[in-house]
Image (tube, rainbow, N blue to C red):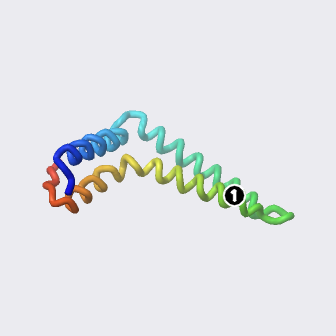
Amino acid sequence: MATVHDARTLSRRAGALAAFTKHPSWPEFETTIEEKIAKLRRTAAAIALLDEGADQRKLDQIRGTIAALKWFKGVPENAQGTLEDFLREQGLEVPDE
């Protein structure tokens, strides 16, 4: 069972992470990530179509990088929901926004 201290710490952390999406630079951050992902996909397509054959190791690295970028972008967006789910599982009250 989570303590009140644990719940407060999680709430503070989730709030801080969720606040990133409210920052005026957040749209620029998202755009930069999407542009990077698009560039990686173009690179992967070029590698996959090489006459000498695709370098699977490079393709896997690109796939992993894209997954990491998507995860990184999603952390602030998912923080609040993750916190609320945890609090419910612990039988604690979830405050309304």
Quarter of the image with the N terminus is: bottom left
Q: Return the residue nearer the eye: 68 or 86.
A: 86
x 29%, y 55%: residue: 81
Looking at the image, is 22 positioned above or below residue 84? Answer: above
x 37%, y 46%: residue: 76
Q: Return the residue nearer the eye: 22 or 56.
A: 56
Looking at the image, is 5 positioned above or below residue 57? Answer: above
Q: Mark 1 points at which residue?
A: 44
Q: Most extreme residue toward the top, as rendered?
A: 24
x 16%, y 54%: residue: 94
Mark 1 neighbour density, 10 Å: few (under 14) some (14–19) many (20 or more): many
Q: Where is residue 13 in the image (x, y as percent from the top left)?
A: 30, 42
Q: Return the residue nearer the eye: 89 or 76.
A: 89
Horizontal arrangement in the rendering, residue 3 relative to residue 48 (left or right): left
Q: Where is residue 86 in the image (x, y as percent from the top left)?
A: 26, 57
Which quarter of the figure has residue 19? top left
Horizontal arrangement in the rendering, residue 2 relative to residue 24 (left or right): left
Q: Position of residue 80 (x, y in %)?
A: 29, 50
Q: What residue type is labelled 1?
A: Ala
Q: Is mark 1 on a helix, strand or loop?
A: helix
x 45%, y 48%: residue: 73
Looking at the image, is 38 positioned above or below residue 24? Answer: below
Which quarter of the figure has residue 47? bottom right
